[in-house]
Amino acid sequence: MTRMRVVLVDDHALMRQGIRTILSAHPDLEVVGEAASGEEAIDVVLSTRPDVVCMDVEMPGIGGLEATRRLVANPDVTAHVLMLTTFEREDYLLAALDAGASGFLLKNARPEHLVYGVRSVAAGEALLAPELTRAVIERAVAQERGESAAGPAGAVPESLTEREVEVLRLLAQGLSNDEIAEKLLVGRSTVKTHVSNVLMKLALRDRVQAVVFAYRSGLVG
């Protein structure tokens, strides 16, 4: 069995221990390192090369958001970041996604949801806390539009084909590849190719960032 390697980053030792206990109960997950600050996280990730980093948002020093930004920008880091926070705040959600996080969960999530989240981001998928998905993104993006001196969000780039725009819109509505394939009457592999093309053309890291882009561009919401 291939084990998914995880690093835990939180300034509270009890929180790290709790997450370690949850993840260690599953044979496909292995905690390979811990850190108590953003600065320490960078060193630990570089030395242990995990698949997933469970990153707290608020910590002393540079904090989880800046640590995530630095990790994602480092070509030697291949780990996906799953942000964890106690605070149900939309500004944290969008800041985490902008920093390059692949997932965002509240710390009061059920243990099985945490395990699912780690597995999802390790597989290159994306995950948002159910409590912080569509409604939160809609509110935050609406606020951004209202505060922007540039006016409403820009249109989707012309580089996307009509079908790719359609796939992006359905993706932003929360549909899986299988559901999109069924709706468009095409094969799953075709949808996967369209999603990959959308991410590449828009220079987006994953599906979560594609959802945010779709809201910001006015495709949905």
Image (cartoon, grey):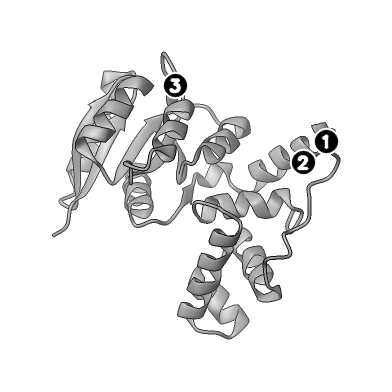
Q: Classify 57 as above or below 211.
A: above
Q: Classify 124 as above or below 23.
A: below
The residue shown at (61%, 54%) is: 211
Mark 2 / mark 3, whichever is N-terminal = 3
Helix, strand or loop at label 2? It is helix
Please give the count of numbered marks on the rendered protein: 3
Q: Position of residue 135 (x, y in %)?
A: 67, 45
Residue type (three-letter) at the residue carrying disc 2: Ala
Nearer to the camera, 200 or 108: 200
Q: Position of residue 119 (x, y in %)?
A: 32, 52
Give the residue at mark 1: 146
Of circles 2 and 3, the one toward us is 3
Alpha carbon distance from label 2 to label 3? 27 Å
Nearer to the camera, 119 or 112: 119
Alpha carbon distance from label 1 to label 2? 6 Å
Question: Would you say 217 lies left or right of 111 here?
Answer: right
Give the residue at mark 2: 142
Helix, strand or loop at label 3? It is helix
Q: CB under 8 Å between callouts 2 and 3?
A: no
Alpha carbon distance from label 1 to label 3? 28 Å
Question: Would you say 134 lies left or right of 25 here?
Answer: right
- For the N terminus, the image quarter is bottom left
The residue shown at (76%, 35%) is: 143
Can you see residue 4?
yes
Residue type (three-letter) at the residue carrying disc 1: Gly
Helix, strand or loop at label 1? It is helix
Give the residue at mark 3: 63
Residue type (three-letter) at the residue carrying disc 3: Gly
The residue shown at (27%, 27%) is: 43
Q: CB under 8 Å between callouts 1 and 2?
A: yes
Mark 1 / mark 3, whichever is N-terminal = 3
Count residues near mark 1 (Cα–Cα under 10 Å), then give few for <14, some for 14-19, many for 20+: few
